[in-house]
Amino acid sequence: HTPRDFFLLHLSLTDLGCICTTVPKAMHNSLWDTTTISYTACAAQVFFFLFFMSAEFSLLTIMCYDRYVAICKPLHYGTLLGSRACAHMAAAAWVSGFLYSLLHTANTFSLPLCQGNALGQFFCEISHILRLSCSHSGYLREIGLIGVSGCLVFSCFIFIVFSYVQIFRAVLRIPSEQGRHKAFSTCLPHLAVVSMFISTSFIAYLKPPSISSPSLDLTVSVLYSVVPPALNPLIYSLRNQELKDAIRKM
């Protein structure tokens, strides 16, 4: 019931949601040698994928703040991250993810699709759907939304980097080498996953069409949609000594 484990619970739900939104349908298509998806299912896939991914990034930002307070302001930890504050932050992550996803999905599927109905991707991705649209104004509106989203994500990333700078400064003052190693081994993988998530997302949505190719698009999409949700359990669960002890007892 600690704040860290409370946020890990919500992060695991978003990871499960991300994987279940895209991978089962892709596996079904591969096993049954089909490449079809209905219009309604495509819209639902876009909505839930954006919902879980945006909520996950919000939770990763909150968890960075949790580590910052725990390491840099330990005496204020119980005050700044009480049960009510944790519940409010988790609710804000889910609500913001829902509103963000609803806005993007409604705008994307309000565009007329006049350039075929074939997506060169293993799931319904907004950038590929926009290529099928012939509405110039709607396309610019969605690009504007993606640009604003990119600015918000980049702001969160700057906050994460600033927090980790403060965390590393505090960790380097720890006299025990074992304590420093434990802190670094937990922080660095998280920072690496967040960096990969942001960089590949920017490449997927903001790269110029001139450098686009099917293999590059597929690789980038897997890197930001499948790899981070798959790595999070390894980073946060298997590095948790309490969880490993509980598994051994079971």
Image (cartoon, grey):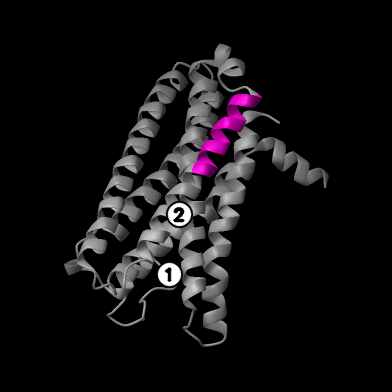
Q: Which mark is residue 104?
A: none
Find the residue positioned furthest to the bottom. 33
Start-end of magenta stretch: 83-95
Identify the residue shown where x is 41% and y is 29%.
164
- The answer to whether residue 185 is above or below residue 169 is below
Q: Which label lies toward us, 1 or 2?
A: 2
Relative image position of residue 245 (x, y in whole percent): 75, 39
Badge 1 or badge 2: first in the primary sequence: 2
Q: According to the image, label 2 marks what residue?
A: 102
Q: According to the image, label 1 marks what residue?
A: 124
Please name the amino acid that badge 2 sits on: Leu
Does any portion of residue 74 appear in the rendered image? yes
Q: Quadrant of the N terminus?
A: top right
Identify the residue shown where x is 55% and y is 45%.
235
Relative image position of residue 22 (x, y in whole percent): 51, 67
Locate residue 113 relative to residue 124 in the image: left or right: left
